Image: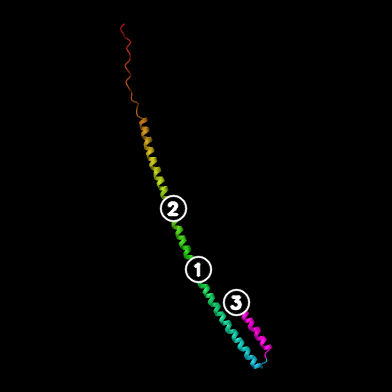
Amino acid sequence: MANSRDFLIGVILGSAIGATAALLSAPQSGTETRQLLKDTADEARARTAGLAQEAQARVGEATSQARTRVTDAAAQARARVTDVSQQVTGTIDRQRSAVASALEAGRQAYTEKQASLQSEVADDSLPATTTPPPPAASTDSAI
């Protein structure tokens, strides 16, 4: 766009310089010189209008391409965010499942150990069974 503007300025300055040079070196009469200047100015205006239209078309095209690129980039970003979100959700679900499984295994181990310890305590608290003393040896022996 800067190139188009520089070119446009060059065309205008070139036209002005050319018109001035034509006036100074014109062997024509004043009427013919004025007509020549008018024609040159009209030609410069037409070129300027053409260049302005061309610049507008290029700007419109560049704007359209930029919009397309931005729209495509936004769509790609949305797709990537969706993919990453799904991956994170899947990882969280797997972690949640692993924690739930570990918690359940811990509960089961606790329940089993509790039952085992209760059984041991119950066995230790039973009253001791007394066994009858062995028959005593008699001291009355016949000699």
**Residue carrying label 3:** 5
Q: Quadrant of the C terminus?
A: top left
As for residue 13 lying within the magenta part, the answer is yes
**Residue carrying label 2:** 92
- 68 vs 103, left or right, is right
Residue 7 found in image quarter: bottom right
Question: Could you tell me what secondary structure mostly forms the magenta stretch?
Answer: helix
Packing grade of label 1 (10 A; few <14, some 14-19, many >=20) is: few
How is the model colour-coded?
rainbow
Q: Are marks 3 and 2 in contact (CB under 8 Å)?
A: no
- Give the amino acid at mark 3: Arg
- Give the amino acid at mark 1: Arg
**Boundaries of the magenta span:** 6-26
Measure the alpha-carbon separation of dots 1 and 2: 34 Å
Q: Is residue 66 above or below residue 115?
A: below
Q: Secondary structure at mark 2?
A: helix
Nearer to us of marks 1 and 2 is 1
Residue 69 numbered tag: 1
Q: Is residue 105 above or below residue 26?
A: above
Residue at screen point 64% across, 84% down? 16
